[in-house]
Image (cartoon, rainbow, N blue to C red):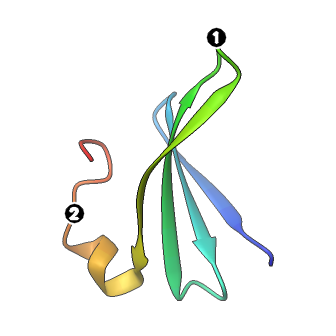
Amino acid sequence: MHATPSFLGEIRVVFNVKGNRYRLVVHVRYDLARGYVRFVGTHAEYDRIDAQKV
């Protein structure tokens, strides 16, 4: 699996997975060294959400 990250601000990262077919949105807590999955779905489903607010 090769995922390409895009950074949305300082705490959100969006990964394009499987040739941009799926999207993974992660909320990153650098102070705790943790990442929290906020969304997993297809590219079309991702287009219907606000990645900053999920």
Please tell me how crowded label 1 is: few (under 14), some (14-19), or many (20+) other residues with Cα within 10 Å. Answer: few
Q: Is residue 41 left or right of residue 15?
A: left
Query: Residue 21: x and y, percent?
Result: 53, 89
Residue farthest toward the right in the current orientation of the protein: 1
In terms of image quadrants, where is residue 4?
bottom right
| Residue 20, horizontal then vertical, whole percent | 57, 83
Which circle marks residue 50 in the picture?
none
Quadrant of image for the N terminus: bottom right
The extreme top residue here reads 31
Which residue is drawn at the image coordinates 32% and 72% (left, top)? 46
The residue wearing badge 1 is 31
Residue at the spot 30% in from the left edge and 43% down from the top edge:
52
Q: Is residue 19 above or below residue 46?
A: below
The residue type indicated by label 2 comes to Ile
Element assignment for label 2: loop
Query: Residue beneath label 2, please?
Result: 49
- In the figure, 37 relative to 27: above or below? below
Q: Secondary structure at mark 1?
A: loop
Q: Residue at x 65, y 19 (%)?
A: 30
In the displayed structure image, the side of residue 33 where residue 46 appears, left or right: left
Which of the 4 image quadrants contains residue 16?
Answer: bottom right
19 to the left or right of 44: right
